[in-house]
Image (tube, rainbow, N blue to C red):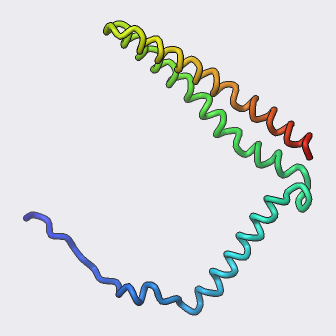
Amino acid sequence: MFFTPKVQTVGSIKDFLAPSPGLVGEAVTVGALGAMGILLVSKADTVLGAGIAEKIIGAFDPLIQLIQGISYPVGFIMITAGFLVMMTGNRQKGLNMIKWAAIGYIGMQFAPAIMAILVEVAKAMK
């Protein structure tokens, strides 16, 4: 009543699906470059040297630290919620929440160390 939807027609489906001659070459070039990038990353040890894997792993360090930092408040909230559930009379469910919150927090703290061990094992298998 107060607002009327504004409809703007840009063209038909046929116009949208018809390829533009100038864009086809660019898409092929971008696709070829993307495929070449994937090939270079997959063959990182032979094409770019062994240091690229460490650079890629190091690039994810801020994300790993962020997730580890978030795990503390989430674990604290879950443990507190477990105690609240115990206070309401559901002892088994509260203890279960506390147990899994603790296991999850410890797992989040050890996950980078476990991955480092797996990377070393993979390097040893080469």
| Residue drawn at 43 percent across, 84 percent down | 16
Residue 5 vs residue 76, the one in the foreground: 76
- Residue 94, horizontal then vertical, whole percent: 42, 13
- The furthest residue to the front: 92
Number of on-image labels: 0
Question: Does residue 9 appear left or right of residue 75 in this picture?
Answer: left
Instruction: Give the vertical position of 84 relative to 24 (above or below).
Output: above
- Residue 49, horizontal then vertical, whole percent: 91, 55
| Residue drawn at 70 percent across, 43 percent down | 60
- The furthest residue to the left: 1
Question: Does residue 35 appear left or right of residue 24 in this picture?
Answer: right
- Residue 100, horizontal then vertical, whole percent: 53, 20
Question: Does residue 123 appear left or right of residue 85 in this picture?
Answer: right
Q: Quadrant of the N terminus?
A: bottom left
Quarter of the image for residue 11 reads bottom left
| Residue drawn at 58 percent across, 24 percent down | 104
| Residue drawn at 63 percent across, 27 percent down | 108
- Residue 67, horizontal then vertical, whole percent: 60, 33
Quarter of the image for residue 116 reads top right
Question: Does residue 40 appear left or right of residue 70 in this picture?
Answer: right
